[in-house]
Image (cartoon, rainbow, N blue to C red):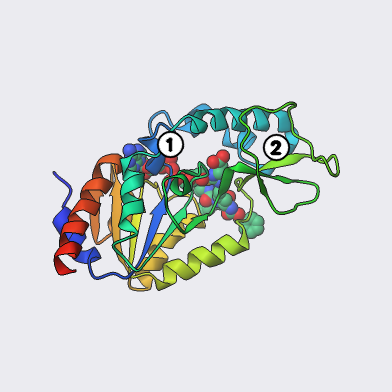
Amino acid sequence: MAPDYERAVAVLKGASKVVVFTGAGMSKDSGIDTFRGPGGIWERFSAQDLATYEGFIRDPAKVWMWNAARRQQVAGLEPHDGYLALAEMEGLFPEVVTVTQNIDGLHARSGASRVVELHGNIWKVRCDAENNEPWLDERTEFPEYPLHCEDCGGLLRPHIVWFGEQLDRRDILAATMAVEECDAILVIGTSAVVYPAAGFPMLAKQKGAVVVEVNIEPTPISDYADVSLYGTAEEVLPALVSALEVELGKEA
Ligand code: BV8
């Protein structure tokens, strides 16, 4: 059944504050694997070894090599048309905030203006010993594995939130404020199983926002979404934004 863009436009067109909430499915069409589902990352790699602090301390070189390989994969990719459509959509509503679970940096690269990265960013590092503010490091290969801090000699770690780690309070606050104040949340490409991130769409619903979901299959969000558009992000988002432009352009 074709996605019901008409209904999606009808529930979205009156919004002024929109949150775009994304997961790994948003980057699938740019060539980045998702975590769950057929061929997912966690089917091939151990989250325990590669995405926990314990795994990092046990074998920091292995975690750095894995993240260097992911950097190499991401560096060569472009944001697909769905990303570009979302950037265009920012011109249709007074306020659009992107809250992403993804660490690939593709939202910012595609022109999204306000991005909250709940789980960090693969292009940032910080000193584990000093636990300082992260900095941008865009290398895809490193002189040594693991990386060490030039100031104190301690281990450098990817600025990524691993399982069992708290999200940065500032990101949680920014996401919570945006989600509590929004009139509409567009939930794209997430299986909605990883908390606390997965709680944001329901929070938006509880605060009275309309929920539009974009996914290739039903998820827990589908149970309470006002509209679910089933299809890939690369196909659905440009079509949705074009339909919104026609509708909102008509009223302009
Ligand atoms: C914390 C960085 C506590 C790593 C990630 C039991 C119950 C509830 C919670 C827990 C529990 N046991 C443990 C927990 C907590 C845990 C959690 O929720 N676990 C889950 C698995 C049960 N959460 C945590 O550990 C968090 N921290 O809770 O701390 C705490 C509190 C106080 C004090 C100290 C500690 C930290 C979670 C962050 C972990 N880091 N990523 C890395 O990337 O290297 S999580 C990982 O999952 C990614 O960030 C990913 O984004 C996130 C969620 O996955 P999705 O983005 O949704 O991706 P997924 O592959 O699952 O789904 C893809 C979707 O896209 C699918 O729906 C698919 O249909 C769709 N799709 C596919 N193709 C397309 C598409 N859609 C559109 N178009 C397409 N083409």
Check disc 1 and report its element: helix, strand or loop.
loop
| Vertical comparison of 216 with 45: above or below | below
Q: Is the residue at mark 1 in contact range of ligand 1, meaning its CB lies under 8 Å from it?
A: yes
| Vertical comparison of 198 with 38: above or below | below
Q: Alpha carbon of mark 1 to alpha carbon of mark 2: how far?
A: 21 Å
Q: Nearer the viewer, residue 105 or 163?
A: 105
Amino acid on which the number 1 mark rests in the picture: Thr
Picture disc at residue 24: none
177 left or right of 220? right
User: Where is residue 11 drawn, in percent x and y?
Assistant: 21, 65
Give the image quarter of residue 78. Answer: top left
| Vertical comparison of 34 with 160: above or below | above
Near mark 1 (Cα within 10 A), the count class, few <14, some 14-19 or many ≥20, is: many
User: Where is residue 197 drawn, in percent x and y?
Assistant: 49, 56
93 left or right of 115? left
Amino acid on which the number 2 mark rests in the picture: Phe
What residue do we see at 44% from left, 48% from top? 107
Q: Which residue is denoted by mark 1 in the rendering?
A: 34
Q: Which residue is denoted by mark 2 in the rendering?
A: 56
Can residue 17 be seen here? The reply is yes
